[in-house]
Amino acid sequence: MGFMLFSDKGMARIRIVMAITLDGFLPKQEEKFMQWLMEEPRKGFPYWKEKASFQINELYGIIDLSDMIRRFSADCICQTIIHDKNSADYADGLFQYNLVDEMVLYTLPISYGKGFSLMDSIGKHHWQLRSFKLYPNGISRLVYEKRRM
């Protein structure tokens, strides 16, 4: 990988990559914008898969993960991509345990008015906008870091 996973300095970071509708709901898999995100190699989810040290999912227990990231170097990025209700539930746990350091949020130019809300999961944290990108299809990408108080 080109860097040490284990280190005495720093600890790994956890990144969440997710898409939401304008009104904060989990988009449906068959949504054309969601398909674009799942397939676009330079702008969508595949781009972030390549940038992470490794992918985490609901099979990684949150308590075990919180212990594990303390042993990894600060260069290590553990990442989960939210694409369905199971992965959204897992992300909810990561937010509840205050483990998320970075959030990549794709906002799709649609609204549902109902569904599975992702905004409740984010909780009460302060986030610093690091970058913003608007794509020609109307999708926006916001990258946030947790603000250290």
Image (cartoon, helix red, strand yellow):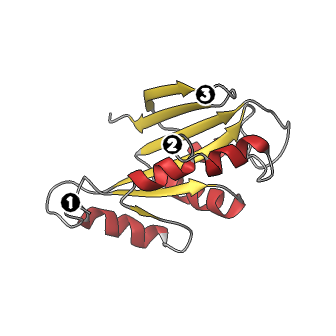
Quarter of the image where one finds residue 86: bottom right
Q: Residue drawn at (64%, 60%), measured in percent from left and top?
A: 89
Identify the secondary structure beneath mark 3: loop
Q: Relative to the observer, which residue lies in front, 99 or 14?
A: 14
- Badge 3 is on which residue? 135
Q: Residue drawn at (81%, 33%), measured in percent from left and top?
A: 111
The earlier-in-sequence mark between 1 and 3 is: 1
> CA separation, marks 1 and 2?
23 Å
Q: Is there a contact, CB below 8 Å, between mark 3 and mark 2?
A: no
Where residue 130 appears, x then y in whole percent?
40, 29
- Badge 1 is on which residue? 3
In this view, the residue farthest toward the right is: 113
| Amino acid of disc 1 | Phe
Q: Is residue 72 above or below residue 115?
A: below
Q: Residue drawn at (69%, 26%), measured in percent from left and top?
A: 138
Identify the secondary structure beneath mark 2: loop
- Badge 2 is on which residue? 42
> CA separation, marks 3 and 2?
12 Å
